């Protein structure tokens, strides 16, 4: 049976760093307040002329290079995002255009912060079917476009960035060992942008009420995350026929330091084995797990044969985890 995994990773973050001290100048908050409650020190914001597809393209070029394939070998693009360039056109198609690729299928996937893991499972299934050989999976966001700079509870949390992976056949015995993805659908305004969709199109009133920006019930998200993160990782481990102590590292969604600390305790797994970079990038939603993995590979922290877990949770509410025996 063929083994399917990640053949190459790439990530990109915009140059513009926005620190907690920058926020102190525009809203009633402090570096200490943000740091102690979230673990975030700074985040990156895209420049005015950068859209989600631009960030996605940068990450994709790196992933293609690291996979040692040519652009033309890519036979499908899946882009996980909540902040596509346009409401009525998939940003994946714009990435295809920017990469200079023709004819291949391209589509967006919206599972919020779990989007990259959802995308990996979709890609895995399609490669396994024999229909595709090298699928480009991207998680990319420009959340700076949808955060309310007057809402101190949410605006300090999010950042922009992109991560990309080439999913295809890898050396036998390596690659994806198990997946677990799911959702608990809700419509209680736990985490969403209330206006701008078909339910509540934007108009003068929604703009005035600032309903075109993200809102979040922090406590509800926290409760969901601390219970879901350990459980979904455990489910994926079971499918991979592994125990938590078989893992060399966990790459959790980079939402909040307290969530990750709580999950580590519940999983009885050392906190130092949870890779974290949220202090530098904040919560980049669908890009966060991939950026963390891409950065760790660059630092030489992930080696061939390592068992690692990618685990996410997000708006929807969605959740997911995959266990990978690293292939390169």
Image: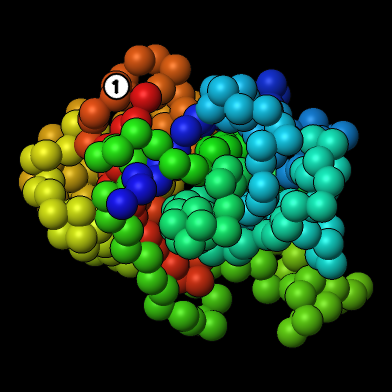
Residue 173 sits in which quadrant? top left
Q: Tell how many labels.
A: 1
Of residue 106 and residue 13, the one placed in the foreground of this image is: 106
**In this view, 203 is above or below 99:** below
Residue 221: give x, y in percent of width and height: 40, 64
**In this view, 128 is above or below 302:** below
Q: Residue furthest top?
A: 299
Residue 78: give x, y in percent of width and height: 63, 53
Of residue 143 and residue 106, the one placed in the foreground of this image is: 106
- Residue name at image x 44 percent, y 41 percent: 169
The colour style of the image is: rainbow
Residue 59 sits in which quadrant? top right
Does the image show residue 87? Answer: yes
Of residue 171 and residue 117, the one placed in the foreground of this image is: 171
Kindly state the secondary structure of the residue where label 1 is placed: loop
Does the image show residue 33? Answer: no
> Are there few (<14), some (14-19), or many (20+) residues within 10 Å of tag 1?
some
Residue 61: give x, y in percent of width and height: 68, 28
Residue 277: give x, y in percent of width and height: 42, 29
Q: In the image, 121: left or right of 240?
A: right
Label 1, on which residue?
303
Q: In the image, 27: left or right of 157?
A: right
- Residue name at image x 23 percent, y 30 percent: 306
Q: Residue furthest right?
A: 204
**In this view, 76 is above or below 160:** below
Quadrant in which the C terminus appears: top left
- Residue name at image x 61 percent, y 22 percent: 65
């Amino acid at each position: 049976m063929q083994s399917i995994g990640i053949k190459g990773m790439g990530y990109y973050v915009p140059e513009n760093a926005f620190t907690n001290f920058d926020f102190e100048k525009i809203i009633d908050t402090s570096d200490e307040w943000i740091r102690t409650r979230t673990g975030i020190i700074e985040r990156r914001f895209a420049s005015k002329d950068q859209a989600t597809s631009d960030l996605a393209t940068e990450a994709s070029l790196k992933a293609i290079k690291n996979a040692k394939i040519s652009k033309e070998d890519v036979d499908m693009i899946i882009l996980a995002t909540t902040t596509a360039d346009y409401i009525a056109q998939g940003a994946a198609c714009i990435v295809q255009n920017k990469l200079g690729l023709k004819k291949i299928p391209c589509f967006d996937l919206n599972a919020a912060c779990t989007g990259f893991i959802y995308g990996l499972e979709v890609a895995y299934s399609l490669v396994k079917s024999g229909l595709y050989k090298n699928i480009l999976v991207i998680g990319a966001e420009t959340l700076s476009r949808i955060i309310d700079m007057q809402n101190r509870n949410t605006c300090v949390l999010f950042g922009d960035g992109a991560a990309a992976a080439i999913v295809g056949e890898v050396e036998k015995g390596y690659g994806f060992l198990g997946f677990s993805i799911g959702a608990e659908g809700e419509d209680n305004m736990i985490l969403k942008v209330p206006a701008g969709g078909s339910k509540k199109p934007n108009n003068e009133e929604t703009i005035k009420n600032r309903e075109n920006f993200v809102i979040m019930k922090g406590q509800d998200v926290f409760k969901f995350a601390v219970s879901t993160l350990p459980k979904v990782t455990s489910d994926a481990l079971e499918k991979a026929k592994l125990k938590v102590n078989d893992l060399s590292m966990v790459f959790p969604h980079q939402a909040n330091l307290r969530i990750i600390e709580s999950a580590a305790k519940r999983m009885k797994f050392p906190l130092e084995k949870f890779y974290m970079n949220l202090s530098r990038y904040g919560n980049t939603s669908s890009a966060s797990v991939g950026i963390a993995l891409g950065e760790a590979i660059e630092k030489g922290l992930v080696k061939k044969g390592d068992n690692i877990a990618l685990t996410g949770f997000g708006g929807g509410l969605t959740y997911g985890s995959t266990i990978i025996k690293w292939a390169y």
